[in-house]
Amino acid sequence: MSTNPLLANLEDRNRPLSEIVLDLSTGALPSPGSTGLPSQRWSWMAELLTDPHWGMTAVVDGLDHICAPIAQLCRLTANAIHPLNLRQLWAAEKQPTAEMLALHSPNNTGHWEVLTAVLEVITDGLDHCQGADVSGVEAVTAAFTAVITSQHPDTARAIIIAAISSAAHPVPVEFPKTPVRLGVAS
């Protein structure tokens, strides 16, 4: 059994995923979006959106064009040297993402939940630019709800365990070397 309380709960197959996500949302279990150094949290949030095995783009089809630019903004935010216009970059993504969210409703595809997670990450990015300490709990909760909604329970558990395991072993933050086109607002 793991020493990480969240992983320990996930490894307990008798514990429903919905209860674990609820405990994440209330703070009863630690969220990888709120523990560790801010640079590690922002890097992990980028991976939560785009990791090819457990990220939202791997879990729910058709949202790469939304998740990838927000993941890039997370990486920029994780870096010690931010672009001067970081707040404007985050702000430019909010309205188009909210409009895309309005086109969906909760169902078994997970699109609505992923878009909700993306909107929560954007909100956290804007709050961060204002100097607020952000938790990422809402984004993580929405993302894991998307996994639960769109995947078979055993697959969903495996995906969430992979995501949490990755947070326990963060990768170094690297500054992007090539210019990227940001999201729908670009």
Image (cartoon, grey):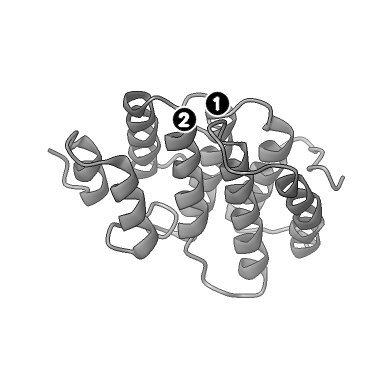
Label 2 is placed on what type of residue? Trp
**Residue 23 falls in which quadrant of the image?**
bottom left
Q: Is residue 174 visible?
A: no
Question: Residue 91 at what x, y percent from top left?
Answer: 78, 61
**Badge 1: few (under 14), some or many (20 or more) residues near its Cα, within 10 Å?**
some
Label 1 is placed on what type of residue? Ala
Q: Nearer the viewer, residue 45 or 119?
A: 119
- Residue that appears at 60% across and 62% down: 124
The answer to whether 81 is drawn above or below residue 51 in the figure is below
Left or right, 72 with respect to 186, comes to left
Question: Residue 4 at what x, y percent from top left?
Answer: 22, 48
Seen as rendered, the residue at the extreme right is 186
Q: Quadrant of the N terminus?
A: top left
Which residue position is annotated with label 2? 54
Please, what secondary structure does the residue beneath circle 1 have? helix
- Contact (Cβ within 8 Å) of mark 1 with mark 2: yes
Q: Nearer the viewer, residue 1 or 111?
A: 111
Which residue position is annotated with label 1? 58
How many numbered marks, from 0 up?
2
Question: Residue 18 at what x, y percent from top left?
Answer: 34, 45
- Residue that appears at 57% across and 31% down: 109
Q: Is residue 15 visible?
A: yes
Q: Quadrant of the C terminus?
A: top right
Say which mark, if any, is on residue 23: none
Question: Residue 12 at what x, y percent from top left?
Answer: 17, 37
